[in-house]
Image (cartoon, helix red, strand yellow):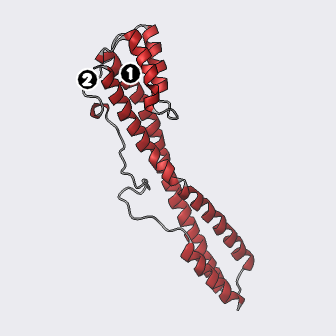
Amino acid sequence: MKKKAIIALCLAVGATAPVHAADFSDPTWPCIQRKVGQLSPGLMWPGPLEAPELSGEVEADVDELVGYLTLRRLPVEETRPQLEAFTAVHGTDPALLGHVFQQAFISLNTLRGRLISGIEEYSLSQIALAERIDSARREMVTAMEADSPDYDRVDALEEQIAWDERIYTDRRQSLTYVCETPVLLEKRLYAIAQMLQAAQE
């Protein structure tokens, strides 16, 4: 009787255990958002991005402004005072402001690339964890169907499955925020480009 009860428990665990997500064309991308691996600054900035010759002082001011523009906890609109202070000193030359955008693009796009790589690794680890849970569940059923079940092994497998499922669920719950971050960085870059272009007018 005990044997049948535990087999039933194994099957019940199987019904609630995590399963693989829908069959995406890219198994390393678990997000609802479409994967855009590379961003192009030319899609955000209308003119050519040149590298103007700047003094060390001007370049330092560019770096300071870019630091504000790329500070994610600060809404882009709230960086307008820093931009206005910059243009009051250095003017609104399109090449200079294009350089500011290019530096902001490099900073945020580099961060975005690291995040996408992290999401891909995250997805592979989730796939591996789901396969580990499935394998342990199958082993439990096989063990309980044996003539002399190893209940110590079954208990160990049950504990492993419970722990792995908890990790899997916790990771899945954080996926929404993780997947939104590259999109938010892309939107921020567009907003920075628009604000810098408006400053030229």
SS for dot 1: helix
Residue under label 2, please give it: 48
Q: Position of residue 177 (x, y in %)?
A: 50, 49
In the displayed structure image, the side of residue 119 where residue 164 appears, left or right: right
Name above or below for residue 81 compared with residue 184.
above
Give the quadrant of residue 8: bottom right
Q: Position of residue 174 (x, y in %)?
A: 54, 53
Q: Specify which label sits upstream in the sequence, 1 or 2.
A: 2
User: Considering depth in this image, is 171 or 67 the residue closer to the camera?
Assistant: 67
Residue 147 is at least partly visible in this image? no
| Amino acid type of the residue tagged 1 in the rendering | Val
Name above or below for residue 169 compared with residue 154.
above
Residue 79 is at least partly visible in this image? yes
The residues tagged by marks 1 and 2 sit, at their Cα atoms, a distance apart of 13 Å
Q: Residue at x 43, y 41 (%)?
A: 184
Q: Label 2 neighbourhood size at 10 Å, few (<14), some (14-19), many (20+)?
A: few
User: Considering depth in this image, is 88 or 16 the residue closer to the camera?
Assistant: 88
Q: Residue at x 29, y 29 (%)?
A: 45
Name above or below for residue 179 compared with residue 148.
above
In the orientation shown, which residue stands out farthest toward the bottom? 1
Q: Residue at x 30, y 17 (%)?
A: 95
| Amino acid type of the residue tagged 2 in the rendering | Pro
